[in-house]
Amino acid sequence: VGFNARSILQDRDGYLWFSCWTGLTRYDGERFESFSREDGIVGDGNLAIFQARNGDLWFENHNGATRYDGERFRAFSVEDGLSHGNVYGIGEDREGNIWIGTDVGIVNRFDGEVLQTLTEGDGLTGDSVHSILQADNGDIWIGTLGGAIRYRRPPDHPPPITIEAVIGDQRYDGASEV
């Protein structure tokens, strides 16, 4: 094979994917098929490959990230809302959100529609992000050149409030008495 493979992954369908400096290559067991910017990938200089639980493939790149849904490629670059072009780490949480780490220590979370950016203001250190993993307890662990960061997402809503008693002209204990 005459290409520079930086990373190799066998997907759920059995295809071998090679992430290369000149693009992407897929091997079906008989022939090699190459993909480039013309096919929709974000650019040359591809690094690692990640397969999400839904089967989508994600490719890290010096120009952003590319998702392949089994039919077409979709590029994510700075122009598309990605915080930085050098993508070095991709992970997924239980909800199916894709976490994209960059060379400048910024992480982007993609929920399928919107890219959300997390920065030093959210507790990141500004070091280059190279790996992202969700632990069993739900914490997101972010591996950086400066160490590991544990990110606990704030709740989507305020915690529930329990009313134990209402006091007016008399005391009412428990909601069933009010």
Image: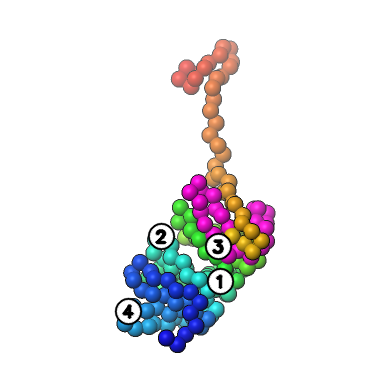
Tell me, yes or no, whether the highlighted magenta stretch contains residue 132. Answer: yes
Image height of 145 relative to 2, above or below: above
- Residue furthest left as drawn: 30
N-terminal of the two: label 1 or label 2?
2
Q: Residue 85's spot in the image, x, y percent?
A: 60, 71
Label 4 or label 2, whichever comes before in sequence order: 4
Q: Which residue occupies the foreground of this view, 175 or 96?
A: 96
Q: Residue at x 58, y 12 (%)?
A: 169
Q: Which residue is mark 1?
A: 64
78 displayed left or right of 111: right
Residue depth check, mark 1 versus mark 4: number of the one nearer the observer = 4
Q: Are marks 3 and 1 in contact (CB under 8 Å)?
A: no
Residue under circle 4?
Answer: 29
Gap between marks 4 and 3 measured at Cα: 30 Å
Q: Marks 3/2: CA distance?
A: 17 Å
Check disc 4 and give the amino acid type. Answer: Gly
The residue at 39%/75% (across/down) is 16
Q: What's the amino acid at mark 2?
A: Arg
Secondary structure at badge 3 equals strand
The residue indicated by pointer 3 is: 131
3D distance between C-alphas at marks 1 and 2:
21 Å
Is disc 1 surrounded by few (<14), some (14 to 19) or many (20+) residues within 10 Å? many
Q: Earlier in the sequence, mark 1 or mark 4?
A: 4
At mark 1, the secondary structure is strand
For disc 2, the marked residue is 53
Which is nearer the eye, 74 or 56?
A: 56
